Amino acid sequence: MAKKDLQSVTANLSGLAATLPTQKPVAPHNVGPVPVRTTEKLVQFSLSMRPELRKQLDRLAAEADMTMRAFVLHALKEKGLDVRDEDLVDLRKQRG
């Protein structure tokens, strides 16, 4: 079995990844990531649903490369709610 060239795979995927949506919005003029607002308090919201519906939501969010939270907020934005780019940022702790 031949040794695989993983560097070329990484290079090819980097170009593809650049075209996909992200949950780390970039500030105008590509200055860098948009900071998460720390002055506004976030409130918790809970939503109960059937397990099958939860699986569908999880699948759709994964296909969009988003968390379920961001996917739902994006849908609310499309319905006209005032959802800001910083609201769509992934709030999970980053692995270091």
Image: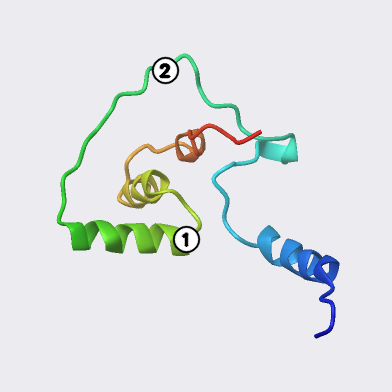
Residue 64 disc label: 1
Q: In percent of the image, x 25 and y 56: which residue is there?
A: 54
Q: Residues within 10 Å of mark 1 (few under 14, many from 20)?
A: some
Q: In percent of the image, x 72 and y 66: which residue is there?
A: 13
Q: In percent of the image, x 59 and y 27: which residue is there?
A: 35
Q: How is the image coloured?
A: rainbow
* Quarter of the figure that contains the C terminus: top right
List the single residue furthest toward the front: 1
List x then y, in percent, for residue 18: 69, 59
List x then y, in percent, for residue 72: 33, 48
In this rendering, the answer to whether 85 lies above or below 61 is above
Q: Quadrant of residue 47?
A: top left
User: Closer to the camera, 73 or 46?
Assistant: 46
Is 72 placed left or right of 27 in the picture? left
Is 51 placed left or right of 38 in the picture? left
Q: CA distance from mark 1 to mark 2?
A: 27 Å
Could you tell which of marks 1 and 2 lies nearer the N-terminus?
Answer: 2
Q: Which residue is mark 2?
A: 40
List x then y, in percent, for residue 40: 41, 17
Amino acid type, label 1 = Ala
Mark in the foreground, 1 or 2: 1
Q: Quadrant of residue 6?
A: bottom right
Residue 96 disc label: none
In this rendering, the answer to whether 26 lies above or below 78 is above
